[in-house]
Image (spheres, grey):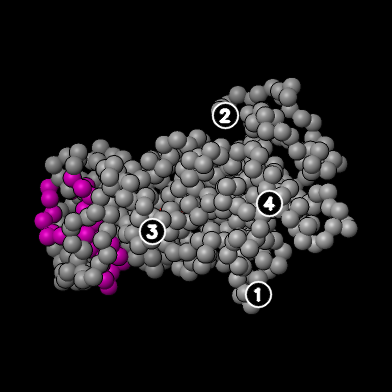
Amino acid sequence: MSFDHSAPRPRPKTQPKAQPSLGPSRRRPGLLQRRVSIEATHGIKVPTPCPDRLFPEPNQNPRASSTNRNENKMKTSETRINQGPIAIIGAGIAGLSAAARLREQGREVVVFEKARGTGGRASTRRSDWGGFNHGAPNFTCSTPEFSHKLKDWCRRGIAEPLRDPIFTLSHGEKTLSKEEPLHYRGIPGMSALVRDLASRVKIHFSTRVHQIHGSPGDWRLTLEGGEDVSGFGAVVVATPAPQVTALLTISRHLSSLVSKIEMEPVHSLMLYFDSPLDLGFAMARIKDSPLAWMNRMPTEGTPSGESWVLQSNPEWSAENMDTHLEEVSQLLLGALGQATRRKLPMPSSWDTHPWRFARATQPLGQPFLWLPQSGLGICGDWMQGAGIEHAFNSGLGLAGAINPALISLNPSRFPSPPPRSEPRRAIWMNFPVWVSA
Ligand SMILES: Cc1cc2nc3c(=O)[nH]c(=O)nc-3n(C[C@H](O)[C@H](O)[C@H](O)COP(=O)(O)OP(=O)(O)OC[C@H]3O[C@@H](n4cnc5c(N)ncnc54)[C@H](O)[C@@H]3O)c2cc1C
């Protein structure tokens, strides 16, 4: 599929005419047609109504028992979801961990990413002064799922444990942080992790998805600029929660659930000094300051100087989200001087990146969400925490739920839904939502 925004394409002969009055089963094209339609609808608007309700129920026999009806319902939707490629919105750790696992299992996936490269909040900014991990600088590991992947990355030289001790810095006082878990980094930068996950995945960069619409088994994405891409069996949204809400207007239940998640901002200040600072540490948490964290970038492949990435504390960033970035840089540089109680040289180069949605203040408490009858899924770090490991496990878990090899039509094979007294009750009452244990 190519996304040439400049060239309008003629309507291809294979393009099925929109027939809004037909039932879902007759409208559904076969796999081959579906592929053609994805190719062909690029740049062509196919007018079909956007349903308010998600699941038109096909071919129900009124005399069938409710159990049979439920099973039929599930079988039909599973068939639909298993046909057609899976669209994944977001090429961060979560989206790519889902994509990589689905690809391993033989599913066709197409990833849409608004940025020019992979990584999201785990990307590495390239510059003449070397790479800067301006999102996550490193990560920890505590679960078997992630540990399995991490071992593989370490074996292949894509990640390694960090040897430098972590300090706590407050008004110039430096103390060794005790009982820190082992931290890891990507080699040469954090983006190595996502590059590895993305290695066999088809990704469309600089392609922002504006809206999801269509019907189960035949989802369409409207891209920024108005183009429609159609024929997806399932759609996975792997973006920060506030961006999910904007995309999932088709499901009031999902969007109202997700809209409760708040994500706080962080500014990252990237600094390059011509000569080493000799601070006596490479990583430090910072207390009582607009800064929360600083770490030195590994020196391999960089010029003779020293690169640092500083992260603001989220409260400070929330107050300064509208401040001009140049002023933010100056304020954070001043805060660095105060935190180290050192007269530092001016960096020869600097840049600030504002992360509007850096981390969830209160995660959702589920590893992922999957609506099996519609083929809509959500994953991301904010589902159950705020970090690389949560993002990876969320995508992996969702891929497991989507994969037909792991899906049984017997719902008892899945973990039970939360008790009805929980606030998420509404979604369970309306649709079966399977989440992993
Ligand atoms: C400053 C900072 C410091 C951090 N420090 C750590 C740390 O020390 N340890 C740790 O483990 N974690 C840390 N994290 C968190 C870690 O980076 C995230 O948990 C993880 O990268 C989230 O991955 P994700 O795939 O869930 O989301 P993201 O990385 O946010 O990926 C979502 C992707 O979706 C794309 N997207 C959004 N909307 C659309 C759209 N409409 N169409 C197409 N694409 C879209 C985005 O461009 C992005 O690439 C830090 C994060 C930040 C910002």
| Res. 293 mark | none
Q: Amino acid at mark 2?
A: Met
Q: Is any part of residue 138 visible from this angle?
A: yes
Q: Which is more N-terminal, label 1 or label 2?
A: 2
Q: Circle 3 sits on which residue?
A: 144
Q: Quadrant of the N terminus?
A: top right
Q: Circle 1 sits on which residue?
A: 420
Q: Which is more N-terminal, label 2 or label 3?
A: 2
User: Residue 187: x, y in percent?
Assistant: 27, 44
User: Residue 38: x, y in percent?
Assistant: 64, 32
> Circle 1 sits in a helix, a strand or a loop, which is it?
loop
Q: Circle 2 sits on which residue?
A: 1
Q: Amino acid at mark 1?
A: Arg
Q: Is residue 192 magenta?
A: no
Q: Which is more N-terminal, label 3 or label 1?
A: 3
Q: Which is more N-terminal, label 4 or label 2?
A: 2
What is the CA distance from the residue labelled 2 to the residue labelled 4? 24 Å
